[in-house]
Amino acid sequence: MPEPQQVKLDTVDDEYDILINSLGVSVSRHLLDEHFTVIWANDNYYSFFGYTKAEYEALFENQCDRFFVGYEDEWNRIGVIVRKALAQGDASYSCIVSMPCKDGSSKWIKLIGTFTSLTADGYPVAYTVMTDVGDLMNTQHELLEERRKLETLAFVDPVTGGLNRTRFDIDVRTLLDQSEPNEYALVSLDLKKFKLLNDMFGIENGDLMLAHINRSIAAHLHDGELVGRMASDEFNILMAYESDEKTVERLDAMARAMNDHNSRVDQPFNLTFVAGIYVIDRPSLSVTVVRDRANVARKNVHGILREQEINAAFYSDDDRIALVREKGMENRMYDALGGGEFSVYLQPKVQLSSGEIAGAEALVRWIEPEGTIVPPNEFIALFERNGFIVELDLYVFEQVCKALRRWIDQGRSPVPISVNMSRIHFNEPDFLDRYEEIRLRYGVAPHFLEFEFTESIVFDGVEEFEEIVAAIHALGYRCSMDDFGSGFSSLNTLKDIDVDVLKLDRAFFMSEEDIQDRGWAVVSSVIDLAEKLDMETVAEGIEQTVQVERLRDTACTMVQGYVFHRPVPLSEFERLLFER
């Protein structure tokens, strides 16, 4: 085997140049003058940018500042880094910069410079190694873009373009950690009748309105204040707190700004809001607790909304006590249901024509082991919010079916019993299946059972309710509209709602005036209309004999109220019904 040929190198630089070129690395030697003048470079230095050595020297005369024309920001950045490294006595420096190429493009280059003890023409000498990091930078840009997209998904509300709940909570936590007691207030803001807005103008315009609301609020905020959308029509605002009066004034100003669109549209729609405000006296509380307190205050807002303004309530210590009470009930509700603490009471419905009990409404009472009765207005709303009302409704329905079965087995003639049904059931498409399973288990005919729905459920979604009524009737049950007249009843809509019974709210009968009262004219008209639509009518909340006598002059079917009977336990109802 022949001996390898020895290549004679004239200088160490030649040997170094061959080695570096073989590695594909750019190496250059520079004077640390104002031009960063090139005093030597290997071939890769020039080819990095598409030049030959001759072209580079002719165009730029080995002066790097001339090479960077059009890229002055990058040139200045290199200068700052080099000067800082020299000033600190560092042995080297590094940076990533964008550098121009002969074809007009640019490259991302990583520069690594090493200072030497050598000098030339009175200037220090430095070596610079350059590597192409374009692929790395492109990957980094792609990762940054993906991160930006992920952050948008995680932190930006897709409807308003503002903060979503997650980002809002993070930013609120940061601000509260640096705040003093009573420095901030959290506002829970709810847009009233947003579903109606969607129905009138369409979901797309509803989303545009939500974005407008967010912008209007943000335009009235100061530095260190935040707004975010928490749910479909619910916003949270973190505001600097000065006083109750000032806070309400600022909210009113926001509401006026939100409604300024009405001056520019053909079909105006006044936005009305309720707001709960918690002055954050304990910044260390979790954001969830802070929000809960603002929500509690919002739910305590009562009364008719002022036009184009916000009705607001502030969180108080009484609210805190109520919140603790609610939490205690929530912790116990399943055990209470299993332990028989919920009792079914029945309030008789009396037939006006005969004076006999012709039906009853099933009501629920929570009687704690020590005998304390929890008022329904304390736990029903809570169970509506947390969904437990579904289990409670089904429990009441089963107790009614059990009572009906017992009466039938005893050879007695039952009367129809109505049970209340929450709209929470509608979240499950086959919710009637559970009712049917209970009814069939006890073998009770469906015509003995009636479902009561509040007026608000009916008119919140007429088309949906029509389908539900049809399904109920298909199974043989009856249904009634409860509390008619308590809210925003529409007589015109009644023609589309095929309920069997219309229950007139007690509000119709609150007047102390005699039979000339205009309210009686309304009552009579509604009863006549119901009769024409083949609906029975039940007058609720009747407490005076004179009211009963007045109702006898109408086509009202039944009366339910204290004038005849209060709600009573099952055993007492049986005595009233079967021992009369």
Image (spheres, grey):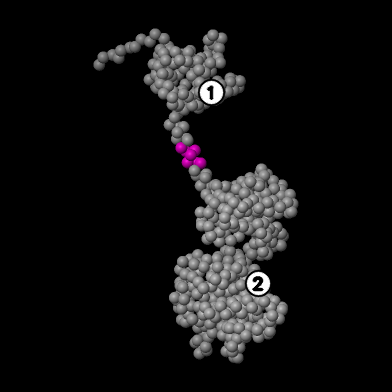
Q: Quadrant of the C terminus?
A: bottom right
- Figure check: 281 above or below 46: below
Image position of 82 with respect to 298: above or below? above
Disc 2 packing (10 Å; few <14; some 14–19; many ≥20): few
Q: Is residue 490 visible?
A: yes
* x and y, in percent, of residue 171 in the image: 61, 46
Q: Residue at x 66, y 47 (%)?
A: 220
For mark 2, give the secondary structure.
loop
**x, y percent for residue 95:** 52, 26
> Does the magenta-highlighted stretch encompass residue 189?
no
Q: Nearer the viewer, residue 316 or 548?
A: 548
Q: Residue at x 53, y 54 (%)?
A: 205
Label 1's element? Answer: helix
Inter-mark Cα distance, 2 to 1? 77 Å
Q: Does the magenta run of residues contain 147? A: yes
Which picture quadrant has residue 579? bottom right
Residue 40, position as x, y percentages in the image: 46, 13
Quick one: which residue is furthest to the left in this view?
1
The quadrant the N terminus occupies is top left
- Pointer 1: what residue? 72
Foreground disc of the pair 2, 1: 1
Q: Nearer the viewer, residue 543 or 497?
A: 497
Magenta residues span 142-148
Q: Earlier in the sequence, mark 2 or mark 1?
A: 1
Rendered image: mark on residue 375: 2
Magenta-drawn stretch, dominant element (helix, strand or loop):
helix
Q: Nearer the viewer, residue 60 or 295?
A: 60
Res 225 label:
none
Q: Amino acid at mark 1?
A: Glu
Taking 550 as reference, is 122 left or right?
A: left
